[in-house]
Image: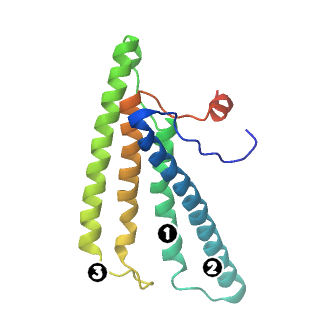
Amino acid sequence: MNGTIRFTPMRASGPLRPLALLIATLDVAVGWALVAQIVVMVTIVSIQVVLRYLFNSSLDWADELARLCFVWSIFTAIPLGIKGGAHIGIEMLVARFPTHLRSATARLVALLGAAMLLLVAKESAVMAWDQWDELMASMPASAAWFIVPLGVCGVHGALHLIWQALTGAHHVDPELQAELS
């Protein structure tokens, strides 16, 4: 790997092509959003450290904004882990299944996971709606912005799991796979 981040769409034709393009577009947007979130978080924390220790001063809102960026970065990165199959799985029983049954089980588990993530997205939308009028302690913004990334993660992650249920495959970058092997 040459250190360059690449986002490649899943190979698909026919009726799956729009889903593949949608997921790839979301992956690219999330990748850039992650970069921005981490840059903002590191910059704010660094400025806060300098202000506190060199000037005996601080920004009231810095901790809350850095925490918000942290929460967003964690939840928006989860679907990218799902995409590459990077999440932990327990396969003691399934590994002993015949190949065709192993594939069917993986598809079923992906479909159930997608359903659960869509439920998380729905419930987080309800919670965010209910809390939208509550403001953060140090910033004039809704506290519900801490809940919104759950919905984003739920929908984006569900799309990856639906892809896996339909195709039976993770989308792993071949160079990354070779590097990890």
* Of pointers 1 and 3, the one earlier in the residue sequence: 1
Q: Quadrant of residue 180?
A: top right
Residue 51 spot, x, y in % from top left: 67, 84
Q: Residue at x 45, y 84 (%)?
A: 138
Q: Residue at x 52, y 34 (%)?
A: 11
Badge 2 element: helix
Judge left or right: residue 174 versus residue 78.
right
Judging by the rendered image, the residue that carries numbered circle 3 is: 133
- Nearer the viewer's eye, disc 2 or disc 3? 3
Quick check: 116 above or below 52? above
Judging by the rendered image, the residue that carries numbered circle 2 is: 48
Amino acid of disc 2: Gln
Judge left or right: residue 15 versus residue 11.
left
- The one of 26 and 90 positioned closer to us in this rendering: 26
* Of pointers 2 and 1, the one earlier in the residue sequence: 2
Distance of label 1 from label 3 (alpha carbons)? 20 Å
Asked if the residue under mark 1 is in contact with the one under mark 2, i.e. CB atoms within 8 Å, the reply is: no
